[in-house]
Image (cartoon, rainbow, N blue to C red):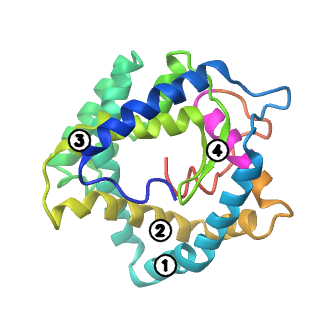
Amino acid sequence: MRCLLISSGPKRAAKPFVLILPAFLAACATSGPPGNGISDPYEKVNRQIHEFNKGFDTAVFRPVSHGYGLVFPQYVRQRVNNFRANLDLPGEVINDALQGEGEDFGHNFFRFLVNTTIGVLGFFDPATSFGLERRTTDFGETLKVWGAGEGAYLEVPLFGPYTQRHLAGDVADLFLNPLTFVGLSAPEAYIPPTTYVLEKADQRYEFSDTVDSVLYGSADSYAQTRQIYLDNRRFGLGGTAAQGPAIDPYEELYGE
């Protein structure tokens, strides 16, 4: 799963962030995919992590997601998803600005205002009916706009597939979103990570057949997951995919 927990103490995490991000940016800037379109110099370790992630999905995440989907009706689960998406919007607005996307900046800014007020903190989505549909972005896309290469393919424990650029972007997004620094004490501090996990559990439930076919029905689930992830990520960033757009069981279901 992507980002299973969000740190409740972002200031303490700042030092690792400062140390890690420049290294990832340097790697992204100097490494690109070889002729086959895939840069996977860490395949041996990645495969071991992939098997760990499959085991976690089998033992924990798949049964939990099925329980969540069966106990709570789709209407309730959608309200949670809406609330989670609204929490991400301030960071997306900042990324729009960093990318020089003025129209998207205004669009997402007003979407946040409408859904936070009329939509009751984002549990409802009146903004879409006003023509302010969701437009997602992240700092990984910002890095692409700034010219950073995607870097090597990685599989991270519990977080699933990434490129180096995407991983650096996800770390940076924690610090770009102003809501990360809102001082919350328990139990309110558990709301962001809890809604994140519930959103991914809902997606795992809704697309269970697709995810199962990739993870458990493929002759080589690692290679299949890698290809789907890279195709989907590149297509989402406006590039081309070897097999066209496809559902990525981690990018689409376990996180952005």
Residue positioned 43% across, 59% down in the render: 4
Q: Nearer the viewer, mark 1 or mark 4?
A: 4
Query: Which residue is disc 3 drawn over?
Result: 11
Q: Is residue 71 left or right of residue 93?
A: right
Q: Is residue 143 left or right of residue 41?
A: left
The answer to which image quadrant residue 90 occupies is top left
Query: Which residue is disc 4 drawn over?
Result: 154
Q: Nearer the viewer, mark 3 or mark 4?
A: 3
> Would you say the residues marked 1 and 4 are in contact, meaning their CB atoms lie under 8 Å apart?
no
Q: Earlier in the sequence, mark 1 or mark 2?
A: 1
Q: Position of residue 178 (x, y in %)?
A: 22, 37
Q: Earlier in the sequence, mark 4 or mark 2?
A: 4
Residue 47, visible in the rendered structure: yes
Residue positioned 63% across, 57% down in the render: 249
For label 2, the SS is helix
> Would you say the residues marked 1 and 2 are in contact, meaning their CB atoms lie under 8 Å apart?
yes
Q: Earlier in the sequence, mark 1 or mark 3?
A: 3
Hey, what amino acid is under mark 1?
Val
Q: Position of residue 24 (x, y in %)?
A: 53, 30
For label 3, the SS is helix
Hey, what amino acid is under mark 4?
Leu
Q: Earlier in the sequence, mark 1 or mark 4?
A: 1
Hey, what amino acid is under mark 2?
Ala
Query: Which residue is disc 2 drawn over?
Result: 201
Residue range corresponding to the magenta coloring: 226-238
Query: Which residue is disc 1 drawn over?
Result: 64
Hey, what amino acid is under mark 3?
Lys
Q: Main secondary structure of the magenta part?
A: helix
